[in-house]
Image (cartoon, rainbow, N blue to C red):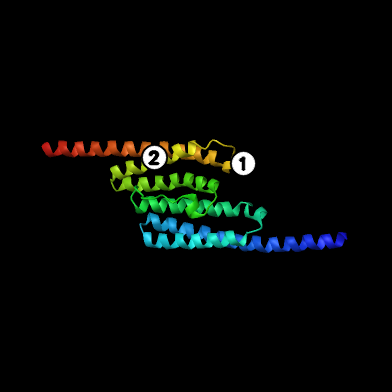
Amino acid sequence: MLEEISIRIRDNFEVKDKIREEGLKISREIVRECRTASFALHGKDFEKAGNSIEAAGRALKKLEARFEGHADIYHAGFVEHAQQEYSEVAIVYSLLKDEGEPQNLPSPDELGVEYAAYLNGLGDVVGELRRHVLDLIREDSFEKAEVFLGIMENIHAVLMDFDYPDAITRGLRRKTDVSRSLIEKTRGDVVNSIQQKKLELAMQSLKSRL
């Protein structure tokens, strides 16, 4: 009888191991597509970014379907990581494409991701927006830089509302702390750049009068 039990357990583990390997492969595909989309976004290639995001979304649905009935593997961590990456790039795409005024920011239900993964992805958006703000500063687009700084601050305010144990939010508190630090640095960069530009203009005006 013990031998029969052992065989059933082994068969179950064999199935789970196969599904896990397939899941890891799909998860890596999702992350790869998301990173491709991220690079394309900062290069303002929205068509390429959109295509990669759609590919990541299809892969995510395939991943979830493959894990149906295997919740223990589904919650092992790599699915959540893929969902975070997908949430992050989908939100950044929406923000950059509509220049900081998206008509409809994608929701976790629309993206088909867990709430904790969505919030953690949202936390990572702050870092991507900091990069965008620095690009805007280099272009002397200070008004747009201030708009995106405001979005970063709004995201942080939203994340602060979710003061729950890490077992529920999956490490959101750390990302919230990191986002606050990034916002403070970005605010300093924006303010200093605006002041520097004003000083340059004042000096140019002075020279023209001399």
Image location of residue 35, percent across then percent down: 47, 57
Quadrant in which the C terminus is drawn? top left
Residue under label 1 = 167
The 10 Å Cα crowd at callout 2, few under 14, some 14 to 19, many 20 or more, is many
Point out the frontmost of discs 1 and 2: 1
Residue corresponding to mark 2: 186
Rounded to the nearest angstrom, the CA distance separating label 1 from label 2 is: 30 Å
The earlier-in-sequence mark between 1 and 2 is 1
Q: Position of residue 162 (x, y in %)?
A: 52, 38
Of 107 and 95, nearer the camera is 107
Residue occupying the far right of the picture: 1
Give whichever of 17, 40 is nearer the camera. 17
Q: Is residue 106 above or below residue 160?
A: below
**What's the residue at 47%, 46% (across, down)?**
122
Query: Visible in this render: residue 74?
Result: yes
Q: Residue 23, located in which quarter of the rendered image?
A: bottom right
Residue type at mark 1 is: Ala
In the image, what residue type sits under mark 2? Thr
Point out residue 65 in the picture as x, y percentages from the top left corner: 59, 61
